[in-house]
Image (spheres, rainbow, N blue to C red):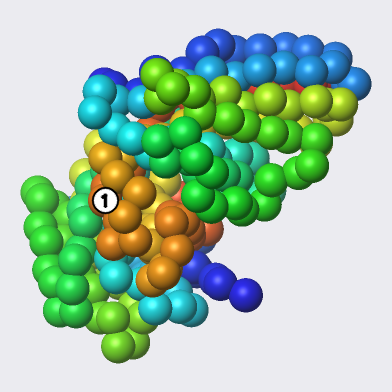
C-alpha cells in the first residue's frame, strides 16, 4: 500500500457525460500528479500540483481539468467524455515540488470505461 | 520533443536466463527511476538512480545509469516467473516538475 488513495476504483459512464476522480496523497506529500494509462498511449503525464498550485502540464485535453484543495487532496474532472477517454487514471504523490525530484508513489488507479 | 524509449517493448524469456532492458532518454535528467507494474495494478517503485555511474541492486534486478549516454539499464539475473510484469523507466527532466515515463517493457518469464 503506497498510501495514495484513489476513488472510485471503477467507473462506467456514457459518452458526453462528466466524471470526477478523487485522489488523497500520502501523508506529508505536497505534490500530486495525474497520469492516464491506455493500451495504445502508454503512461501519459497529465498535470501536476504542488501545495495547491499548478506546477506542470502535460498532454491534458481541454475537456479535462484538475485542482488541488487546501487539504491537499486533488480531483481530476473529465467532461464531454468520449470512447477514447477510457483508460486507467493514476494519481501519484511525492514530498515536494522542488526541481530535483523525489520518488513518486502511485495510487491503485481509477478504471474509467466510457460506453 | 522529449522521448523516453525502452527496448525491447516485449520480452519473453526462460527461467534461469539473464537479460537486459534498456532505457534511452533524449533530455538532461537529474535522476532516473525504475518502476514495476503487474497487470491492472499500480506502479511500484524499484530503484532511484541519482547520479552518473550509479548502480543499484535488489534481488535479481540491477539497475545502472549513464547520464552522459542518457542510458539506463535494468539487468535481470536468473529470471524467475515472479518477475513477469511490465517495467517502466522514468526521467525527471532538469528544470521541470514532470516525471516522464518510458514506453514500458512487458516481461514474461516462462517456467
The residue at 40%/19% (across/down) is A71
Residue A26 in the image, given as x and y percentages of width and height: 29, 25
Instruction: Identify whether B94 is placed above or below B77.
Output: below
Q: Which residue is mark 1?
A: A102
Name the subunit of mark 1.
A
Judged from this view, the residue extending furthest toward the right is A16
Q: Nearer the viewer, residue B58 or B82?
A: B58
The residue at 59%/13% (across/down) is A10
Classify residue A40 as left or right of residue B56.
right
Q: Secondary structure at mark 1?
A: loop
Residue A25 in the image, given as x and y percentages of width and height: 36, 26
In the rendered image, which quarter contains the C terminus of chain A? Answer: top right
Classify residue A27 as left or right of residue A19.
left
Classify residue B32 as left or right of residue A12.
left
The answer to whether residue B67 shows anywhere in this view is yes
Residue B95 in the image, given as x and y percentages of width and height: 41, 69
The residue at 54%/43% (across/down) is A54
Q: Nearer the viewer, residue A14 or A4?
A: A4
Amino acid at each position: 500500500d503506497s498510501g495514495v488513495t484513489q476513488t472510485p476504483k471503477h467507473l462506467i459512464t456514457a459518452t458526453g457525460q462528466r466524471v470526477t476522480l478523487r485522489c488523497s496523497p500520502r501523508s506529508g506529500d505536497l505534490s500530486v500528479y495525474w497520469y492516464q494509462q491506455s493500451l495504445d498511449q502508454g503512461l501519459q503525464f497529465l498535470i501536476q500540483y504542488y501545495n495547491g498550485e499548478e506546477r506542470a502540464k502535460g498532454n491534458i485535453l481541454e475537456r479535462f481539468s484538475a485542482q488541488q484543495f487546501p487539504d491537499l487532496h486533488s480531483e481530476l474532472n473529465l467532461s464531454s467524455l468520449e470512447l477514447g477517454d477510457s483508460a486507467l487514471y493514476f494519481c501519484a504523490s511525492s514530498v515536494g515540488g522542488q526541481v530535483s525530484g523525489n520518488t513518486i508513489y502511485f495510487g491503485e488507479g481509477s478504471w474509467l470505461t466510457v460506453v | 520533443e522529449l522521448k523516453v524509449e525502452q527496448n525491447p517493448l516485449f520480452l519473453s524469456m526462460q527461467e534461469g536466463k539473464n537479460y537486459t532492458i534498456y532505457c534511452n532518454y533524449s533530455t538532461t535528467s537529474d535522476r532516473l527511476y525504475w518502476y514495476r507494474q503487474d497487470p491492472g495494478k499500480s506502479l511500484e517503485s524499484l530503484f532511484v538512480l541519482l547520479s552518473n555511474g550509479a548502480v543499484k541492486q535488489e534481488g535479481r534486478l540491477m539497475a545502472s545509469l549513464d547520464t552522459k549516454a542518457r542510458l539506463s539499464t535494468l539487468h535481470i539475473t536468473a529470471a524467475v516467473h515472479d518477475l513477469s510484469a511490465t517495467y517502466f523507466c522514468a526521467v525527471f527532466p532538469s528544470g521541470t516538475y514532470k516525471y516522464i515515463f518510458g514506453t514500458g517493457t512487458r516481461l514474461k518469464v516462462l517456467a
